[in-house]
């Protein structure tokens, strides 16, 4: 992997982590198109670094919310911040269970099969189209909603199913306020990302031998900067009901991916 590949993949991860177009699906497509021949250990390390970059960008964008939530929890009272933290924890359960019980099965989908990615992108397109047509409300995310949104997040572990697209769409279709749905969607994934990074690091599966840290660093920087832009932009787009544009995009990319997998 060279510097240009790292920048391209970093930009893809940074934007697609927050925009509802599936970061994992685009990374798989990007690796196939770029002909990425990185050994599995280096590829895994790079993927972890990119996800760490976008998680940090989330913390920066929502720094005021996170400080407020932590402050409320430290009061050791049942308040709005504590309730929000409980919702986040409930939303994590489905993904944690699926991730632990079906880790090998999930990893098998990340083998460069962009036909499957294309099919899942088309499903994402349908979800976004339905969510865009839903009416906006002032309804907050409930405890029940957080579990259902968590199930959507677990399903989005498949490459091609957009995590943000699936969780925001599910939340909106449940009747929740679009801005609150986007905020919950972005904050609910942060503990999972850091937990997954810790698991990968502690498992010993990640090797730093013969690693070009310059390449890794430039990929991290590209993903972090693009993540800041995309996260802020996405909140505005959801509020203005602009998800249909991403629906059309996912449909187009999904069809192209399927055609590419068949004929190339």
Image (cartoon, rainbow, N blue to C red):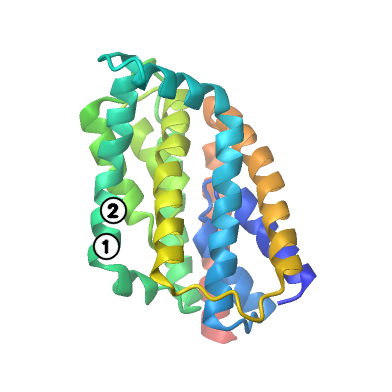
Crowd rating for badge 2 (residues with CA inside 10 Å; few <14, some 14–19, many 20+): some
The residue that label 2 is drawn on is 96
> Residue most toward the right?
4
State how far apart marks 1 and 2 are (Cα): 6 Å
Does the CB distance between marks 1 and 2 fall below 8 Å?
A: yes
Residue 52 to residue 176: above or below: below
- Which residue sits at x=50%, y=72%? 206
- Which residue sits at x=29%, y=17%? 76
Observer able to see residue 82 = yes
Residue 17: give x, y in percent of width and height.
55, 50
- Which residue sits at x=59%, y=60%? 49
Residue 200: give x, y in percent of width and height.
43, 65
- On-image quarter of the N terminus: bottom right
Residue 124 to residue 139: above or below: below
> Could you say which is closer to the camera, residue 126 or residue 174?
174
* Quarter-of-image position of residue 170: top left
Q: Secondary structure at mark 1?
A: helix
17 relative position to 87: left or right: right
Residue 193: give x, y in percent of width and height.
45, 51
Residue 245: give x, y in percent of width and height.
58, 43
- Which residue sits at x=26%, y=68%? 102
């Amino acid at each position: 992997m060279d510097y240009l590949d790292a920048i391209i993949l970093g930009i893809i991860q940074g934007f697609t982590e927050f925009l509802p177009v599936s970061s994992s699906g685009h990374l798989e497509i990007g690796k196939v198109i770029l002909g990425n021949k990185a050994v599995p250990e280096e590829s895994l390390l790079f993927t972890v670094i990119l996800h760490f970059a976008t998680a940090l960008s989330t913390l920066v964008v929502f720094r005021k919310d996170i400080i407020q939530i932590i402050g409320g929890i430290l009061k050791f009272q049942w308040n709005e911040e504590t309730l929000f933290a409980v919702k986040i924890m409930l939303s994590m359960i489905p993904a944690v269970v699926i991730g632990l019980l079906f880790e090998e099965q999930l990893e098998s989908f990340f083998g460069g099969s962009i036909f499957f990615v294309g099919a899942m992108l088309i499903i994402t397109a349908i979800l976004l189209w339905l969510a865009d047509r839903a009416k906006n409300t002032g309804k907050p995310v409930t405890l029940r909603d957080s579990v259902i949104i968590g199930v959507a997040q677990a399903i989005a572990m498949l490459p091609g199913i957009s995590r943000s697209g699936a969780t925001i769409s599910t939340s909106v279709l449940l009747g929740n306020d679009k801005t609150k749905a986007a905020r919950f969607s972005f904050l609910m994934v942060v503990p999972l990302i850091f937990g997954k990074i810790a698991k990968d690091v502690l498992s010993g599966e990640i090797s730093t031998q013969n690693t070009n840290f310059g390449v890794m660093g430039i990929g991290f920087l590209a993903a972090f900067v693009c993540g800041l832009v995309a996260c802020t932009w996405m909140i505005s787009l959801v509020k203005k009901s602009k998800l249909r544009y991403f629906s059309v995009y996912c449909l187009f990319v999904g069809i192209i991916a399927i055609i590419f997998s068949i004929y190339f």
